[in-house]
Amino acid sequence: MGFLKIFLVFIFCSFPRPTIQNDLETYIVHVESPESVISTQSSVTDLDNYYLSFLPKTTTISSSENEEAASMLYSYHNVMKGFAARLTAAQVKEMENKHGFVSAQKQRIFTLHTTHTPNFLGLQQNMGLWKDSNYGKGVIIGVIDTGIYPDHPSFSDFGMPPPPAKWKGVCESNFKTKCNNKLIGARSYQIANGSLIDDTGHGTHTAGTAAGAFAKGANVFGNANGTAVGVAPLAHLAIYKVCNSDGECPDCDILAAIDSAIDDGVDILSISLGGSPSPFYDDCIALGAYSATERGILVSSSAGNEGPSVASVEKAAPWILTVGASTLDRKIKATVNLGNRKKYEGESTYRPKISSSTFFTLYDAAKNASETPYCRPGSLTDPAVRGKIVLCLQDDIVSNIEKGQAVKDAGGVGMIIINQPSYGATKSADAHVLPAMDVSAADGTKIISYMHSTSNPIARITFHGTVIGDKYAPIVAAFSSRGPSEASPGILKPDIIGPGVNILAAWPTSMDGNKNTKSTFNIISGTSMSCPHLSGVAALLKSTHPDWSPAAIKSAIMTTADTLNLANSPILDERLLFADIYAIGAGHVNPSRANDPGLVYDTPFEDYVAYLCGLNYTNPQVSKLLQRKVNCWEVESIPEAQLNYPSFSISGLGSTPQTYTRTVTNVGDAESSYKVEIASPKGVVVEVEPSELNFSELNQKLTYQVTFSKTISSSQPEVVEGFLKWNSNTYSVRSPIAVVLVLTT
């Protein structure tokens, strides 16, 4: 369907090398922090020298060939104690004997996972949050991705102030003339190709979504026409290119980029890439984000594109804002009319120059070989394809646009993509090379049944363009990864959902082949698209509330989220059923309400030590995250649900009640009173003490206690959900509750 998938490929990175040399591979090496080395600017050289001391200083002869010398790639100063180096297995073995060595892991490869969305999010010019935040003025968003196309009008600095004095970043030498007051920094970590130019489009799209300038005349084939603008249009952008043209993003490069971004002075980090769920100590994004958060940087990251599978959510560390994806109230509508007068709706950005009422014969690509249902390049060899509309099945191997090219090359005149059943109502509006559209699996089944019912099946595709006003929006995207978190089930993930389906934003090239225009856009889908929306929202909140911590900003976003759609009914999922708590987290982002939340849950950073020890991590594993020695036997650990988080995820509630505390900070009215409202999950009693919180001043902190008790017997584990709200005359502060009931009699 053209969605940008996110998954971890366990490929060990080997750069091209002469055949006479031994196998060098990239390793990330963790070392202890020596007492003589302190993480300050004055000790950077000492730290580098300490790292270099671990590398073998002599070459050896092995198998009658000269062993290639070890070489340092990155020296990490912020995200971890350690470095990335090119090493042989023998050199790693030698290194293991050195004092201070902790571990060496082979590099892993991570992969990649607008005109209307600001309006859909309630952002309007010269009023509300945009006005209050001055459009994100003065905030720096770092985008870790595939680079950028700098000449795009979305990155014009017209009306932009210079970067703030704290900015310490650079535009690398081959990019200095491209930087301006909008695009203030650009670094590449691609050794094979140091160019910062985005040759996939992904990084340009995400950067434009987060902080693109106002760009008139944005459209794809005339669809979604209007003025494109990012969520925080006056925020500055710093670009960190870590992915190659194949969308492969080595973890050593990701760590190096986060390391630099911390020193450069970014306020927000937007990371639309990732890998399979893994423990936090073994997840480079969790590792880097921990250090960034400690320095006051909010890290926003995509939840993954492995939905609707349960427990597929990624980047689930509590110090990361984990973002799922949902639809807009905009459709790029297309319909197919069949010869039996039945009509089915889909989506497509294709727009014919001349509309046609001609019917064409339908051709089922599944007619001949098992390979052809997916319309992969070269698979459509039947001459009967010529002049027909071809039915093709969606898959994750070949994009919908590539399928269309295969149909066109075989002489087809049109294409209908039939989605996988798991995608439900989620459809992709792709920029096709021929008349084509995307339909649901249910509608596809009806179309195929019609084909089998007649000797002359015919159809006509009609393109209606942009249609605004889907009252069921937002709907959770099928591909949006779901909770619970495997790494930490006691923290509810994803945190939030935002626009991620058929999003229009900046693109390096014109989709219609016009090489004479710089104003080029594309419509694509993925949690890669929802993440920069939330990065932009976080930038607006940082501009309005510069003293808020990353945890406070995240809390404001979560406790003010919408749980109802435009029809004022509960948000639906791709099946058009009520979306569960593991699909939407706290709900759909509401930027304007997030700007004035009343209360925030501010997680003290020191609490993460007790939290990590409570995950039963070993001392070395916790030390790896914290970059210092930790003895969990000396730490009063806490269960996951005790972390001062804006949501509750109670795992394993049995006959014994569970009690947790939360502390809220008053950021609303100085003198205010809040009363608790409880919607207890089925079979659970939720008791809150006290039931009323009375504040007398701003920034005052008050603590309450919540007890969860099971009231029914369970024959099997069951997930139930509810919420608690603190309501005042002005504010409503909502925390979602997920409870896993365990077997009891």
Image (tube, grey):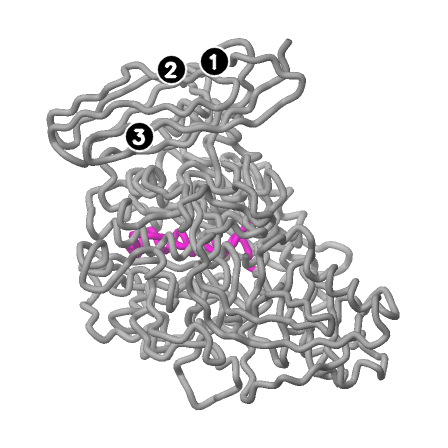
* Residue range highlighted in magenta: 248-274
Residue drawn at (23%, 35%), measured in percent from left and top? Answer: 731
Q: Amino acid at mark 3?
A: Pro
Q: Amino acid at mark 1?
A: Ser
Q: Secondary structure at mark 1?
A: strand
**x, y percentage for residue 718?**
60, 25
Front of the two marks 3 and 1: 1
Which residue matches tag 1? 709
Residue 219 quadrant = bottom left
**x, y percentage for residue 736?**
41, 32
Q: Are marks 1 and 2 in contact (CB under 8 Å)?
A: yes
Residue 403 quadrant = bottom right
Nearest to the observer: residue 243 or residue 313: 313
Please check the rendered image and state whether residue 273 is part of the magenta-colored stretch, yes or no: yes
Which residue matches tag 2? 687
- Between the C-alphas of marks 1 and 2, the distance is 8 Å
Residue drawn at (39%, 18%), measured in percent from left and top? Answer: 660
Q: Which mark is residue 680?
A: none
Mark closer to the chain start, 1 or 2: 2
Q: Secondary structure at mark 3?
A: loop
Which residue matches tag 3? 604
Nearest to the observer: residue 165 or residue 466: 466
**x, y percentage for residue 564?**
41, 43
Hey, which residue is sitting farthest right in the picture?
368
For label 3, the crowd category at 10 Å Cα-Cα, with few meaning under 14, some 14 to 19 and many 20 or more, is few
Asked whether residue 644 is in view, the answer is: yes
- Between the C-alphas of marks 2 and 3, the distance is 25 Å
Q: Secondary structure at mark 2?
A: strand
Please check the rendered image and state whether residue 426 is part of the magenta-colored stretch, yes or no: no
